Image (spheres, coloured by chain):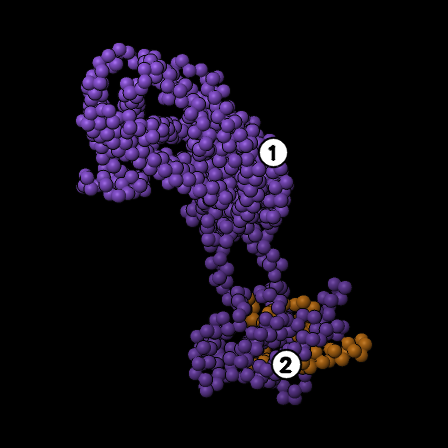
Amino acid sequence: MDPDAAKTTRESLDLAFRISNIMDTGLDRQVLSVLIALCDFGLNPEALAAVVKELTRECSSSLPTPSALSSVP
Amino acid sequence: MEEEDQQKILDLVKELVHRLLSQNPSSKAPNSNPNHNPNAPDFQNALRYAIRILSSRLTPSIAPDAAAIAESIKRRLATQGKSSQALTFADLFNKFALKTGPGSINNKWAVLYLLKIISEDRKTANNGPNSVALLPNLALNDPDLKNDSRVLHNLTRGDRGWDNGVLLVAKDPENLREIAFKEYVNLVREENEVSEEVLVRDVLYACQGIDGKYVKFDANVDGYALLDTVKVPRATRLIVRKLCELGWLFRKVKGYISESMDRFPAEDVGTVGQAFCAALQDELSEYYKLLAVLEAQAMNPIPLVSETASSGNYLSLRRLSVWFAEPMVKMRLMAVLVDKCRVLRGGAMAGAIHLHAQHGDPLVHEFMRSLLQRVCSPLFEMVRSWVLEGELEDIFAEFFVVGQPVKAESLWREGYRLHAGMLPSFISQSLAQRILRTGKSINFLRVCCDDRGWADTATEAATAAGTTTRRGSLGYGETDALETLVVEAAKRIDKHLLDVMYTRFKFKEHCLAIKQYLLLGQGDFVQYLMDIVGPELSEPANTISSFKLAGLLESAIRSSNAQYDDCDILDRLRVKMMPHGTGDRGWDVFSLEYDARVPLDTVFTESVMGRYLRIFNFLWKLRRVEHVLIGAWKMMKPNCITSRSFTKLQGAVKLQLLSTLRRCQVLWNEMNHFVTNLQYYIMFEVLEVSWSNFSNEMEVAKDLDDLLAAHEQYLHSIVEKSLLGERSQPLYKSLFVLFDLILRFRSHADRLYEGIHELQARTMASSLPSQDKNKSRRQTSDKSSEPGSWISDGRKALTQRAGEFLRNMGQELDAIAKEYTTLLEGFLSQLPVQQHVDLKFLLFRLDFTKFYSQVNPIK
């Protein structure tokens, strides 16, 4: 990776992080970078958001049993 | 590459799950050592779950438009009251979006969208679980809302539905909307047996006059309509019918064109009709072009931003109705014109179309103008060739100037006339008159005058008017130009014609000659003529030979000033004997005639010459009476009768003689006064005045029509004023009775003076010495029928005879005098009553001293 590309990447990530802070998403840098990478691959952002939502919800509340997990479509 | 990507994705997902799980604040492990244990059952479950979610929704439900998403985020931030943050966000986004090239994010929109959803999810998660079932942006109790702006509060309270400007269909978990849409589509499909595309195609066919699969021409309704068997909603049926009006109009126009074209060989349709058909066909070809474009468009779908979304074809029935608006107007116009012009031809057709062109709408106006330009071009061509060359190229009888074959002398008056039916309404009546006259003049010049000089004037006129003499230089809408051309041409041709008439044919001279000879203007000639011809004419009419009269005419001409006239004029002067009955004398049938040849006989036609003849007769009679009276005067000269010779007579006889003589002279004076004044009136008040008026008119006459009118006026005034008109009949009759009386007087006066001379001779004879007596006897023996009676009776008998004779004469003279007086009074009383002609000058002359009105007061 040439230094220009690396710089661009770093700056983009930085901007994205600041945007996400403004929007109050509660994501940290690492998670955000992973998400961005996944989006770049063409995954549906709605689906990714759903994943984030579900997993954070799971974590914020007490760990649900696996049976409860399967009930969600 | 695919495998690699998949592996990378999987790794990333694992990473994500791990991080999210390790974010757990309520992690049971107190030593928060992020245990990256891939084998933990939580982890695995979570991973599986994540993968399931990711694979279930593969396509986003919105358009990948980063700018739109950014806008909505900005708006949301602003409405939440975080305007400074919104500005910062805008700034950041601009920078973010500018980052392109290797190493930058490709799906920026995805990132933004992701962040947006996450932040919303957080908000709803914070706001409680009951908002999960709703669309997330319908949350009512938003703690972020600041309370300082009530409007914003209300706004955001109720209108969250469209907050982001993006429809999130995929957000409702139960897919209510989709179900509703699917149901609707099924319903519509059920109702419409035929799809809209097919209908559109059929309508396009109908508009070209062709029956489609479902739209056919219905003779009952007289229009194109959908077949009743086809099941379509009523609205569709109506719109199809409306659109097919265009088809009906088209059919009508096309029908007319083909009908006309069939009639072309039969030469039933004129050039104007042909031009009209051609113009209509051009319009129709424009129309065909439009239809072709529409048909090509009909099959193309509307291009949309999203690749997978489908839309209907470009052309729907409603779009068609918008497209057809303008052609409908034009087609309607054409159909109206076709109806109007079905039975018309030529100029009438052009006029009818012109009337329709008076329209305020600029589209209509433009259309009609171009149509009219083509339709009227044959007409204008005809006008041009008529005005500049005098040619009438009119095979189909469409022009408003109609010619008919006539003799040369009536070419001007009757050869050409206007046909009002074919006159188009944009050519005014006066312009049409001018056009007629110009062409007539050219023809007149060509035929009657053998003149070729007008061709130059034509080119001059054209250049003066700014056009050329070529074909097709004038068109409709240039009526002013046409008018200028016609006016210029008319001016020049008229001038040329008048020049020719005056200089080559010496019109003025001929008029003057007619005045001199036929109207007895040349006094000395008339005097000589009368002297010579007089004795001849006293014979009965059928014994007079016209050759002899012609010879006498010649000698009269030679002995007067008339001999210095132009011999061409003198050649035309002739004696004419009118058709006579048995009792007529020469005086009644004698007349002079003037031979006016082509082209002057346009002015001096048969009827005109007839009128001249009447006037001549009257004037001739008047002259004759005058001549008679002059002759009587010659006889009455006093020195013929010396009173010396009457001394031998008795006093009574002498007295009688004197009184008779006196009475005779008085009567003569009266008659002479009357006749002279009448003569002078005719000469000065009537003839000369009319002639000077006519001369003035001739000076200012601009064309032959003016000249003809002036001449007509001249003759008319002469006829009226000399009491020859219709309304002066009673006066005329009494005048002639007076003339007859005068002639009788003359004969009496002759007898009287003869008798007196005889008496004189007798008395002279009786006082003469015998030689002379014998001589005079011999002389007298020839004269009197009773040679012996006078002399043998002696002086007594002489006196007696003389007395008797004189008494008789006296009585007769008295009778004549009385009759004369009555007649004259009758005549004079009728004069002031004549309203139609100004006879006050005559009355003035005759009754100068008011003698008659005193004697007989006129009531």
Which residue occupies the extreme bottom position in the image?
B31
Does B349 sit left or right of B74 as displayed?
Answer: left
Left or right, B451 with reference to B322: right
Percent coordinates x, y for residue B834 in the rendering = 27, 38
Q: Colour of chain B?
A: purple
Q: Is residue B390 above or below residue B295?
A: above
Report which residue position mark 1 lands on: B451
Judged from this view, the residue extending furthest toward the right is A2
Quarter placement of the C terminus of chain B: top left
Residue type highlighted by circle 2: Asp
- Name the residue: 64% across, 82% down: A18
At x 58%, y 58%, the residue is B309
Three-letter residue code for mark 1: Asp
- Can the viewer see residue B320 in this picture? no
Residue that appears at 51% across and 37% down: B508
Residue B532 shown left or right of residue B484 in the figure: left
Q: Which chain is orange?
A: A
- Quick check: marks 2 and 1 in contact, CB under 8 Å? no
**Image disc number at residue B91:** 2
Q: Which chain does the numbered disc 1 sit on?
A: B
